[in-house]
Image (tube, helix red, strand yellow):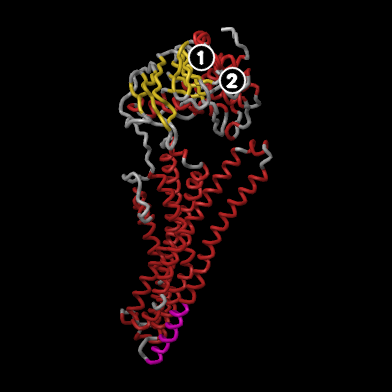
C-alpha cells in the first residue's frame, strides 16, 4: 500500500501533482527512474539532426570539419565515426523507449491498483453518516472512472510532458550556443504558446470539473435505476426513467461538448504561432549562410531542430487535455483517500469470553440535521437472555442497533446526543471497532447477499478464505437456519451462484441464508433487525424455530414488527416516540392494556387473544 499522508485532508488549493507526489510514498523512486528514461530517450531522439549536420560538415569541409579537429582526419574515418554514432544513438533511443514504456506502464498499473484500494479502505472505514450525504453512483465514478483517468495519464501523458520540457530546454540551449540571433527568432512563438497554454489550462479546468460532476450524476441515476428496476416496471415508469436518464446524459454530453470545443481549438491556433518561428529560422538562417556568418551544416541543424522544437507543441493541447482530466480526477481520488472517520477505535478489550450483558443507559440521539430520535432510553439485556424491542415505525428501534454496532456514534458533548451503551460493563466507544463487531452477529430486514455461491455467502462473516471453511460447518449453520432443505434442492446445492444481491433467490430464502451466516459467525450477541417483516408465514415460522435454537445461552436482541416473533422473549421493551414506554413479558404487557396490547389486538384481529 502506498503511504498515505499524515494530514487528515489536503487543502483544495494544493496542486494535484503535489498531492500525488506526497501520496506516492515508496513509488517515488520508480517515478524518478521512469522520468530519467524519458529524458534520455528524448535527448537521443534529438541527436539525429546533429548527426545530419555533422555529415554535411564532413562532406563540405572534409579535413577541416569538426570531427577532423577532434583527431579523425580522414574523410573515410569521419564517416565511419558517424556510422558508429548513428547505430549507438538509434540503439540507445530504442532501448530507452522500451524502458520508459515498461516503467511508466507498470507504474500506472501499480498506482491505479493501490490508489483504488486505498480509496476503498478509506471509504469502508467511514461512518454511515458520511454515506447518507453521497450516492453510490458518485463513489463508483471516483473508484472506477477517475482512477482509470489517472492511469491513462501515467501511462502516456506524464512521458509526453517530460519529453516536451526536455525538448524545449535542450533545443533552446543548442540554438543559443550555435546562433543567438536565429535562436531569438525561433523562440519568438514560445511566449505566445506558453501564455496560450496557461490560459487554456485556466479555462479548461472548470469545464472538466463540470464533466466529472455530470458523470457522477449520471452514474448515480443509472445505479438507482438498476437497483429499482422492479419498482420501475411495476409502476410502468420506464418512460419516465428514460427521460430522466436522457436529461442527465444530455447534461453530460453538453459539458463534454463545452470542454471539447475549447480543447479542439488549441492545436490549430498553436500551429499559426509555430509557423512564425519555423519561417524565421528558414529565412534568416539562410541569409546568414549566404553572408558567410553561419556554416551550412549549422544551418541544417537549426532548421531540423526548429521542426523538432516547435512541431511537438501542436500536440500540447491534447497533452494538456489529458493532464487536466487527470488532475481533476486526482483531486477527487485523493479527497477520498484523505477522508478520516469520525468514529475511532477504543483501546479497551471486551472480557474473554464475552458474556454479552448489553445495557443502554440514558441514550439520546439525533441524526444530523434531523429531529431527536431517542430521548433517554434505558434498557438492559442480561447475558444469555432475549430482549425484544417493538413499537411503531420511526420510534427509534433500528437506531439502537446502529448505535450498538457504532455505525453511528453517541456524543457526550450534550443534547441531543449522549448516554452510554455497554457490553459486560465496558462502553462500546472504548472498544476497537473490529473487536466490537466481531462480538455481534446481525441479521437485518433487507439481507444482502454478495455475488458468488451460497457457500461463500454463508461463510462471509468468518475471517479468511470462505472456501477453507469445512462443509460440515456450512451445512450445520444452514440446517440450524432451516435453509439446508431448499439449498439441497437446487441443482448445484451450496455451489449455486446467487446472482447480484441474491436476485436468483426468493426473499425468504435470502433471509434464511442471512440467518445461517449469523449462526456460523457464532458471536456471543445476536441481533435480528426486523428479520421477519418481509417474509411469508412459513419462513417466519422457520426463523422462529431457528431463533429458539440459536438464542439458547446467547444474548439476543430482536427488533420486531410482528409481535408473534417475540412473544417468548425474556423481556419486551415497547418504544414510542423515541422513548421506552413499557417493559415486561408478553403476558404482562397484553394484560396491562397499553400500546403493546393495542398492537397485539391489531395483529391478531381479536380483542381477547389467547396468551
Q: Nearer the viewer, residue 470 or 113?
A: 113
Mark 1 highlights which residue? 594
Q: Which residues are magenta?
A: 274-291
Relative to 517, say whether 244 is above or below: below
Please provide percent x and percent y for residue 544: 56, 15
Residues at discs 1 and 2 in contact (Cβ within 8 Å): no
Residue 193's tag is: none
Is residue 286 within the magenta segment? yes
Q: Observer-nearest residue: 401 or 447?
A: 401
Measured in 3D between alpha carbons, the distance from the residue under mark 1 to the one under mark 2, in whole angstroms, is 37 Å
Q: Residues within 10 Å of mark 1 (few under 14, many from 20)?
A: few
Q: Position of residue 190 (x, y in %)?
A: 40, 74
Which residue is located at x 42 percent, y 18 percent? 524
Identify the residue position indicated by label 2 in the image: 483
Among numbered discs 1 and 2, the one appearing first in the sequence: 2
Q: Quadrant where the N terminus lies? A: top left
Q: Does residue 186 show up? A: yes
Q: Is residue 322 magenta?
A: no
Amino acid at each position: 500500500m502506498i503511504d498515505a499522508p499524515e494530514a487528515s485532508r489536503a487543502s483544495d488549493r494544493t496542486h494535484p501533482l503535489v498531492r500525488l507526489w506526497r501520496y506516492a510514498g515508496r513509488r517515488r523512486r520508480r517515478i524518478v527512474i521512469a522520468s530519467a528514461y524519458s529524458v534520455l530517450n528524448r535527448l537521443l531522439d534529438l541527436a539525429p539532426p546533429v548527426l545530419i549536420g555533422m555529415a554535411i560538415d564532413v562532406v563540405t569541409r572534409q579535413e577541416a570539419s569538426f570531427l577532423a579537429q577532434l583527431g579523425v582526419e580522414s574523410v573515410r574515418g569521419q564517416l565511419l565515426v558517424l556510422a558508429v554514432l548513428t547505430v549507438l544513438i538509434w540503439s540507445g533511443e530504442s532501448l530507452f523507449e522500451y524502458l520508459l514504456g515498461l516503467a511508466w506502464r507498470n507504474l500506472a498499473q501499480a498506482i491505479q491498483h493501490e490508489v483504488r484500494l486505498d480509496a476503498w479502505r478509506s471509504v469502508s472505514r467511514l461512518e454511515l453518516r458520511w454515506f447518507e450525504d453521497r450516492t453510490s453512483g458518485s463513489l463508483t465514478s471516483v473508484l472506477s472512472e477517475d482512477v482509470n483517468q489517472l492511469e491513462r495519464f501515467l501511462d502516456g501523458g506524464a512521458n509526453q510532458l517530460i519529453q516536451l520540457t526536455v525538448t524545449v530546454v535542450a533545443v533552446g540551449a543548442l540554438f543559443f550556443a550555435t546562433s543567438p540571433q536565429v535562436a531569438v527568432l525561433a523562440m519568438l512563438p514560445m511566449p505566445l504558446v506558453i501564455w496560450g497554454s496557461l490560459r487554456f489550462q485556466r479555462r479548461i479546468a472548470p469545464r472538466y470539473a463540470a464533466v466529472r460532476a455530470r458523470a457522477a450524476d449520471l452514474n448515480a441515476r443509472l445505479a438507482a435505476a438498476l437497483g429499482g428496476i422492479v419498482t420501475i416496471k411495476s409502476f410502468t415508469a420506464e418512460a419516465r426513467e428514460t427521460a430522466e436518464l436522457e436529461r442527465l446524459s444530455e447534461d453530460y454530453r453538453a459539458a463534454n461538448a463545452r470542454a471539447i470545443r475549447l480543447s479542439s481549438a488549441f492545436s490549430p491556433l498553436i500551429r499559426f504561432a509555430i509557423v512564425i518561428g519555423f519561417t524565421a529560422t528558414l529565412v534568416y538562417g539562410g541569409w546568414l549562410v549566404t553572408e558567410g556568418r553561419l556554416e551550412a551544416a549549422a544551418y541544417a541543424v537549426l532548421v531540423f531542430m526548429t521542426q523538432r522544437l516547435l512541431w511537438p507543441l501542436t500536440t500540447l493541447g491534447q497533452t494538456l487535455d489529458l493532464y487536466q482530466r487527470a488532475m481533476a480526477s486526482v483531486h477527487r481520488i485523493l479527497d477520498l483517500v484523505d477522508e478520516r472517520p469520525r468514529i475511532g477505535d477504543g483501546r479497551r478489550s471486551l472480557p474473554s469470553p464475552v458474556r454479552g450483558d448489553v445495557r443502554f443507559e440514558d441514550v439520546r440521539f439525533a441524526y444530523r440535521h434531523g429531529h431527536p430520535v431517542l430521548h433517554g432510553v434505558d434498557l438492559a439485556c442480561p447475558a444469555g437472555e432475549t430482549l425484544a424491542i417493538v413499537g411503531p415505525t420511526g420510534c427509534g428501534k433500528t437506531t439502537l442497533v446502529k448505535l450498538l454496532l457504532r455505525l453511528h456514534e453517541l456524543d457526550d458533548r450534550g443534547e441531543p446526543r449522549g448516554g452510554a451503551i455497554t457490553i459486560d460493563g465496558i462502553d462500546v466507544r472504548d472498544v476497537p471497532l473490529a473487536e466490537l463487531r466481531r462480538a455481534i452477529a446481525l441479521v437485518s430486514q433487507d439481507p444482502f447477499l454478495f455475488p458468488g455461491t451460497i457457500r461463500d455467502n454463508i461463510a462471509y462473516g468468518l475471517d479468511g478464505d470462505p472456501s477453507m471453511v469445512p462443509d460440515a460447518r456450512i451445512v450445520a449453520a444452514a440446517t440450524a437456519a432451516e435453509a439446508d432443505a431448499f439449498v439441497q434442492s437446487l441443482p448445484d446445492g451450496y455451489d449455486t451462484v446467487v446472482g447480484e444481491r441474491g436476485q436468483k433467490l426468493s426473499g425468504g430464502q435470502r433471509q434464511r441464508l442471512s440467518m445461517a451466516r449469523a449462526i456460523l459467525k457464532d458471536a456471543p450477541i445476536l441481533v435480528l433487525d426486523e428479520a421477519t417483516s418481509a417474509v411469508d408465514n412459513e419462513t417466519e415460522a422457520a426463523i422462529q424455530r431457528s431463533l429458539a435454537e440459536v438464542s439458547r445461552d446467547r444474548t439476543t436482541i430482536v427488533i420486531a414488527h410482528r409481535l408473534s416473533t417475540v412473544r417468548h422473549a425474556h423481556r419486551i421493551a415497547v418504544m414510542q416516540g423515541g422513548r421506552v414506554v413499557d417493559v415486561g413479558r408478553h403476558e404482562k404487557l397484553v394484560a396491562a392494556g397499553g400500546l403493546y396490547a393495542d398492537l397485539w389486538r391489531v395483529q391478531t384481529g381479536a380483542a381477547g387473544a389467547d396468551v
